[in-house]
Amino acid sequence: VSLTQEPGASLSLSKGVLVVLTPAVDAASELTTFTVSTMVDSERREATFQFDYLPALSGATTFVQVSPASMYETTESDTVSLALSLGSVPRLARPFVLSDIMVKVGAGAYAPASKITSSDRDRTKVNVEA
């Protein structure tokens, strides 16, 4: 833990930056509660907040699941609908922004996903129509 205060800080008014280094955790760890407290004379002040451990991402995006897993040959005028479950993707904030997931089907151009249905620490689920 380290604290850096702005010039002119006093006991009645101060601004600063508090840096808290968290310990390494195993991959199953998700959410923990932190309490930061201080004492000045006999006055105790504390702040409690939740910290969400997210897994470190490595490598390219992976296809965890694709549905349908296979399909018949189509023509260019046919619409193809796919449901994709993607791994190694940062958890997306709500409301979802479709352009956060760009997809390319066949020889087509990259385009935003048609729908993002969920995004959590492990995977992001999207629907694609092309």
Image (cartoon, helix red, strand yellow):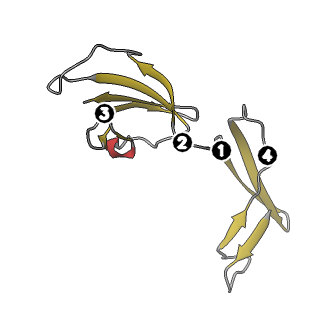
Which quadrant would residue 121 be assigned to in this image? top right
Mark 1 → mark 4, Cα distance in angstroms: 11 Å
The residue beneath circle 1 is 56
- Name the secondary structure under disc 1: loop
On the image, the x and y values in percent for residue 55 come to: 65, 40
- Name the secondary structure under disc 4: loop
The residue beneath circle 3 is 106
Task: Indicate the amino acid at tag 1.
Answer: Ala
In the picture as drawn, the residue positioned furthest to the bottom comes out as: 8
Q: Are marks 3 and 1 in contact (CB under 8 Å)?
A: no
- Name the secondary structure under disc 2: loop
On the image, the x and y values in percent for residue 95 come to: 38, 41
Q: Specify the label residue 29 is tagged with.
A: none
Task: Indicate the amino acid at tag 2.
Answer: Ala
Task: Indicate the amino acid at tag 4.
Answer: Ala
- Name the secondary structure under disc 3: loop
Mark 3 → mark 1, Cα distance in angstroms: 30 Å
Horizontal arrangement in the rendering, residue 36 relative to residue 108 (left or right): right
Horizontal arrangement in the rendering, residue 40 relative to residue 98 (left or right): right
Picture mark count: 4
First in sequence, mark 1 or 4: give its number.
4
Label 3 or label 1, whichever lies nearer to me, is 3
Label 2 or label 4, whichever lies nearer to me, is 2
The residue beneath circle 4 is 24
Mark 4 → mark 3, Cα distance in angstroms: 41 Å
Label 4 or label 3, whichever lies nearer to me, is 3
Q: Specify the label residue 60 is tagged with.
A: 2
